[in-house]
Amino acid sequence: MKRNRRAKIVATLGPASTTPEVIRALFEAGADVFRLNFSHGTHDEHRQRYELIRAVEEETGRPIGILMDLQGPKLRIGTFGAGRVTLKKGQRFRLDFDGGLGDESRVSMPHPEVFAALAPGLQLLLDDGKLRLTVEAVGPTHVETTVDVGGTLSDRKGVSVLGTLLPLSPLTEKDKRDLSFALELGADWIALSFVQRPQDIEELRRIVGNRAAIIAKLEKPSAIENLEAIVELSDAVMVARGDLGVEMPPEKVPPIQRRIIRTCRKFGKPSVVATQMLESMITAPTPTRAEASDVASAIYHGADAVMLSAESAAGQYPVEAVTIMNRIIEEAEQDSYWRTNTDAAHPGNDATIAGVICAGLRGATVALPVAVTVTYTTSGSSSLRASRERPNTAILSMTQSMATSRRLTLAWGIHSVRVDGITNVDEMSSLASETAVREDLARRGDIIAITAGTPFGGTGTTNLLKVQRV
């Protein structure tokens, strides 16, 4: 099955998309990677979805990526005697460890580790930023605040702290249990929530090793301050715009999104733009024009992938949401300005042998009527380098490793195929031509451009570029 686009689609599975028929329909509509969100659902439910995805993969003969998204630490207040209270601007309000039911003057916040990072003048956001408090004084077991923006506050609402690095690991005990389960099951990608600093990625890498690839979810302002270091340590990055929009002014999110995408391309790491892309399609069969423009903008900016959350997990029109997202991407990529913009955003040459080879690959697609570029890869690095260059054709990525083939389904332009090993250049040339024709990416007589590493079978050895006719 060949996609007529370069950018990829990530679709979240949930109650609305757990049957074999719906998952197959989502894949056929355009989903390249499926996300299993550990903020919801049981291990048994996620196992069932995983097995259904792999069954679709077996039926279609196409690799499918599976992304398992860890919940991360969630700071929440306790409960109220009346279930909810109304806070008024200017009033005093206390957060403490006392437990018990809260009222209009106080509520429990059972996160003692957070109190150590608080200081007068810092701001707290409650309920996704709907209420805003300023810290006035901090004691050993409580914090006194003034209400800047009031409103109704109900049980267990979330808390965000602005302007400071919180002394929290991104991996809670729940996350560690979920991670162990995900790795045992065979996840291709692990998404880490609440990333604040490069050390958070290193902590996860020590556990994961090379058993899965890591996506850093950028949802905290402190992560943006450490952007390049986090991108360099990660295998991919997700722009979690909903949470970013809570902790910083909304007008800052679009330029930050573009900055993240540019940084990811610089380092040759896939970028995923997520949250509220087609939000209205949770309950409506078509998106708003603004939402369609939002998806297209991410494509014009160079994102590797765009993601659906509740639209495909819990919405009334999951297949329609993937279908329209697929159409939006195709339309944007047919615009001549998209190609001009993609070339203009080139991050510059990677001064390595592999980088020069892949730059030559891109140059070949500009100078010649190349039908498809072909990469032979073991770890996936050759294909990702080719993807970074954004050649004028699809990238046929050929690998012996099914794990590598599945991981590459997230990256821009890559049509991933698992093949048997090769031992010499003649075998490479022959297999590249045969596979390109079989996958409907080239015809007899077409020109194809091939990159590989010699000796064959090693990793990180890209040193060969060959242009040939099929």
Image (cartoon, rainbow, N blue to C red):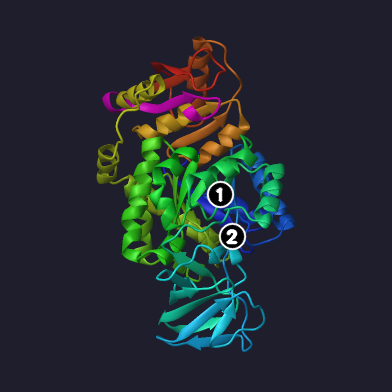
Residue linked to disc 1: 191
Give the residue type that dot 1 points to: Ala
Viewer-closest of 52 and 114 = 114
Looking at the image, residue 373 sits to the left or right of residue 301; the answer is right
Give the residue type that dot 2 points to: Pro
Q: Which residues are magenta?
A: 365-381
Callout 2: 10 Å neighbours few (<14), some, many (20+)?
some
Q: Residue at x 25, y 40 (%)?
A: 340
| Dot in front, 1 or 2 | 2
Q: Residue at x 46, y 71 (%)?
A: 124
Viewer-closest of 196 and 278 = 196
In the image, residue 165 above or below residue 89:
above
- Measured from the top left, where is residue 203 in percent x and y? 58, 44
First-in-chain label (1 vs 2):
2
Residue linked to disc 2: 73
Q: SS class of the residue under badge 1? A: strand
Callout 1: 10 Å neighbours few (<14), some, many (20+)?
many
- Is residue 1 in view? no
In the image, residue 120 above or below residue 183:
below
- Measured from the top left, where is residue 73 in percent x and y? 59, 60
- Measured from the top left, where is residue 369 in percent x and y? 31, 26
- Measured from the top left, where is residue 362 in percent x and y? 33, 27
Viewer-closest of 225 and 339 = 225
Q: Residue at x 52, y 63 (%)?
A: 311
Q: SS class of the residue under badge 2? A: loop
Picture quadrant where residue 280 is located? bottom left
Viewer-closest of 341 and 41 = 41
Which disc, if any, is residue 346?
none
- Mark pair 1, 2: CA separation: 13 Å
The verdict on residue 186 being magenta is no
- Is residue 382 in view? yes
